[in-house]
Amino acid sequence: MHSNFNPSEDLAGNSDTMILGYGSLRLAVSVQQQSGNKMIKLGSLSAVLLCVLASLSNVAALPTAENAVEVIPGPGLPSLASLGLTSADLFKKVIIAARDGAPQLSKRFTDFCQTTDLVNRDNAIACYNYLNALGTTACGVDTNIDFCVAGDAHIGGSSIVGRHVSSYCRDVATGALWIINNCNINNRVEGAATAYGNGDLIVSIEPWSA
């Protein structure tokens, strides 16, 4: 990022203001005329720029195609390209609220949070967004499976009945959303929950290990 302002540049015209371009930001800077020379109030300008730079330093950069953590679908699940998505897209999406009126689930499992090895919540949200985008695509599991990996975060699935179980991927995403919403410690999460409407399929968010 650099300024388009050149202090030595002559100011054309009779305007008593000039526009200073700083990246996508534009500032109106007052100009004084003294002895026929247009002079900028550099003291005021410096103070303004310092305030602007301080503000910009506190703004987190939005993910782009170049710097976004890669979101990796699990085995057999659709690619991001086939959905018209990029990893950066999944980091920009805002998660939706959990659905109300969830059906009664099996009492064999109680959703829980962990604090053993927390992962980045934003990475987990990107995987949630991917699974939610799959809609009614089947997310099935025999014993254990990887549904999605993003950075240090891994959304996986397990069957607790010793046989193949399956749910819509959006319902698996809803299980992950419970963890994201309820197990957040300083933007880091870890835990396990049932898929929406399926007490036999356990969704987990935990660290990824190849």
Image (cartoon, rainbow, N blue to C red):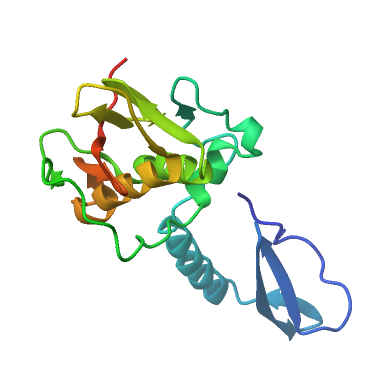
Residue under the image location 52 percent in, 41 percent down: 134
Vertical order, 172 against 16 (above or below) = above
Residue at the spot 26% in from the left edge and 22% down from the top edge: 163
Q: Is residue 60 left or right of residue 106?
A: right
The one nearer the camera, 53 or 102, is 102
Whether residue 78 is visible: yes
Q: Most extreme residue toward the right, as rendered?
A: 13
In the displayed structure image, the side of residue 163 where residue 172 appears, left or right: right
| Any part of residue 150 in sight | no
Q: How many marks?
A: 0
Question: Quadrant of residue 101 in the image?
Answer: bottom left
| Residue 96: image location, x then y, percent | 43, 60
- Identify the image quadrant of residue 150: top left
**Residue occupying the point 58% across, 33% down:** 80
Q: Vertically, is 186 above or below 117? A: below
Q: Position of residue 208 (x, y in %)?
A: 29, 25
Q: Position of residue 147 (x, y in %)?
A: 39, 29
**Spot occupied by residue 170 in the image (x, y as percentages of width and height):** 44, 46
Q: Quadrant of the C terminus?
A: top left
Task: Please tell me whether residue 128 is drawn above or below residue 36 in the rendered image.
Answer: above
Residue 55 vertical position relative to residue 89 in the rendered view, above or below:
below
**Residue at the limit of the structure toward the top, as seen here:** 210
Give left or right: position of 77 versus 14: left
For image coordinates 38% across by 30% down, the residue present is 151
> Residue 186 versus residue 189: which sits nearer the camera?
189
